[in-house]
Amino acid sequence: MIDKVCDNASAALDGLVEDGMIVAVGGFGLCGIPEQLIMALRETGAKDLVAVSNNAGVDDWGLGLLLETRQIRKMVSSYVGENAEFERQFMAGELEVEFNPQGTLAERMRAGGAGIPAFYTRTGVGTQVAEGKETREFDGDTYVMERGIRADLSLVKAWKADRSGNLVFRKTARNFNPMVASCGRRTVAEVEELVEIGELDPDQIHTPGIFIDRIVVTTSEKRIEQRTVQSG
C-alpha cells in the first residue's frame, strides 16, 4: 500500500496547483470544509481559479479567503448568500458566477466522478437555469441536459482516514465531500484522525482510497457560520 500522508497542507498541494485550474471544494456552509487546504491554496498565489463548491464561505473564512485575494475568477455554486465580498465582486462584474440548483450541482460532480459526461434532469426546466441548454422529452416530461463536472483538483475534509486514503466522514460534514472527492483528477483530503491500514471497518468507509492522492492531518477550528444566542 502507498502511504499518502503529507507533513502539512502546503506539502499536500505541492506540484498540484496551476493558474486557471478547476478546483472542487467540499463543504456546506462552514461544515466539512477543508479549511487548512484552502489556506494553503491561497498561499500558492494561484490565480484565475474556477471554484466549484456549494457555497463561497464567508468573508474571512473558507473560500472567502480566496475571494479576498482575488484568486477566483469564476464560482460554480448553489448558495452564496453569506459572503459580502462575493456580492460586491459579482455586482461589479468582477466575478463570473454559474448558479446551480443544489441537487444538480451534487449530481454534476457525482456524474463526473463516475465517468458520465452528461445527464438529464427536470430541475430548472422553464427557468434561467435551462437557458442555452439542450432539452429532451422522456415519458411526456421535459428534461434539461446538465454536464458532469471533472475538476483538476479536489479538496475535501474527512473525519478519519487510513494511510491508503480510505475516508470516513462524520454526520452532516459528509455533505458534498464524497462527490467532490470522486470528481477530481487529483484529490487531497484533510482529516482530523489518522489510523493504520486495516483499522477502519470496510462497511463504514464512505470514500475508497482509490479516489485519494494525498492526505494531511490537521486540527479544525470548526467556526460557526451564524451564531444565535439568547440574552440572559
Image: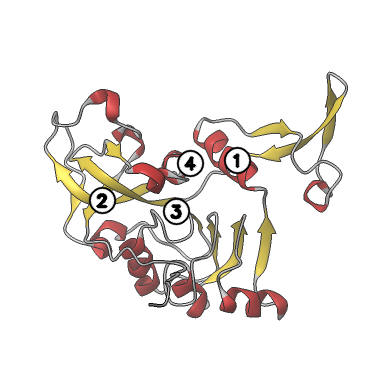
Distance between the alpha carbons at the discs numbered 2 and 1: 25 Å
From what the image shows, is residue 71 above or below residue 2?
below
**Disc marking residue 108:** 1
Residue 128, image x, y percentages: 82, 53
Give the secondary structure at mark 1. helix
Distance between the alpha carbons at the discs numbered 3 and 4: 14 Å
Residue in the foreground of this view, choosing between 39 and 19: 39
Residue 39, image x, y percentages: 35, 69
Front position among marks 2 and 1? 2
The colour mode here is secondary structure
Report which residue position mark 2 lands on.
191
From what the image shows, is residue 50 above or below residue 39?
above
Check disc 4: other Cα within 10 Å, few if <14, some if 14-19, many if 20+.
Answer: many
Query: Mark 3 vs mark 2: which is more N-terminal?
Result: 3
Distance between the alpha carbons at the discs numbered 3 and 2: 13 Å
Report which residue position mark 3 lands on.
27
Front position among marks 1 and 3? 3
Check disc 3: other Cα within 10 Å, few if <14, some if 14-19, many if 20+.
Answer: many
Distance between the alpha carbons at the discs numbered 1 and 3: 16 Å
Query: Mark 1 vs mark 3: which is more N-terminal?
Result: 3
Looking at the figure, which quarter contains the C terminus? bottom left
Report which residue position mark 4 lands on.
183
Front position among marks 4 and 1? 1
Query: Mark 4 vs mark 2: which is more N-terminal?
Result: 4
Distance between the alpha carbons at the discs numbered 4 and 1: 9 Å
Residue type, mark 3 in image: Gly
Give the secondary structure at mark 4. helix
Give the secondary structure at mark 2. strand
